[in-house]
Image (tube, rainbow, N blue to C red):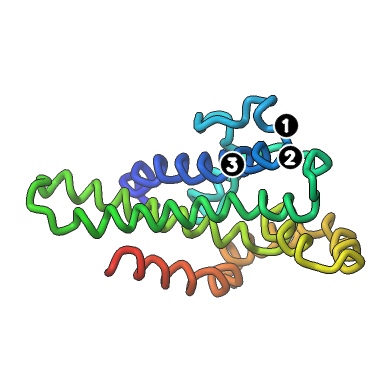
Amino acid sequence: MNLNNLLISIPAILYALTIHEYFHGWTANKFGDPTARLQGRLTLNPLAHIDILGALCFVFAHFGWGKPVPVNPYNFRNPRRDNMIVSFAGPASNFVSAFLFGVIFQLLRNTPFIPMNVSAIFYNLLISGIIINLSLAFFNMIPLFPLDGSHILEGLLPYPMAQKYKEIERYSPFILLGLIILGNYAGIPILGIILGPPIQYFLRLFTGL
């Protein structure tokens, strides 16, 4: 990633990570768990949500994560269902953000009122925002702990199967790290093969390009 692309990506990364974690906390608070709010995480301040390693992975591996918002499922009226919805809120916020950036992009890309040098930067920022939000949304839907997809799958499985699924959680971070390393250093882009098609599809759909 060259310096220009990096500078354009940074605001998009900060936005995507912040909105993702904020909506985890916001949804949890709505379902009766104030943990994130009481710990100062129910905020749109990026500094409260940035995980340095996750942000660096976004820059160099094109997949990343923010600092997880604390959630206490025992505060929910229906812990399994509500925890699943709270987990889905993060990826959903990124997907909706990508859609809204796409709407703005399509509305403005043919306007004659923005100077050419300004429009190029602005449009690149919007496209970067779409790509990063889609990447974060789909990456987090992978059913490997600690990603949101693991909590969603756990909530969807029958209780006995969910308990067996939880037994393999301790191995999931190593599997995830292995997949990232294989893609970036061994030339075996398993994550890219899985996530690339939906990201490209919605990028084309949202931008009209």
Q: Secondary structure at mark 1?
A: helix
Residue 14 visible to an observer of this rendering: yes
Instruction: Provide residue 22's location: percent of width, then percent of height.
Output: 56, 39
**What residue sits 31% from the left and 48% below the top?**
125
> How dense is the environment of label 1, judged by Cα within 10 Å: few (below 14), some, or many (20 and up)?
some
Which residue has dot 2 on it?
71
Name above or below for residue 23 compared with residue 169: above
Could you tell me the amino acid type at mark 1?
Thr
Which residue has dot 1 on it?
35
Residue nearest the viewer, comparing 34 with 21: 34
Could you tell me the amino acid type at mark 2?
Val
Could you tell me the amino acid type at mark 3?
Glu
Q: Is residue 108 left or right of residue 176?
A: left
Q: Quadrant of the C terminus?
A: bottom left
Residue 148's tag is: none
> Distance of mark 2 from mark 3, alpha carbons?
11 Å
**What residue sits 66% from the left and 49% below the top?**
86
Residue nearest the viewer, comparing 209 with 178: 209
Q: Secondary structure at mark 3?
A: helix
**What residue sits 74% from the left and 64% below the top?**
153
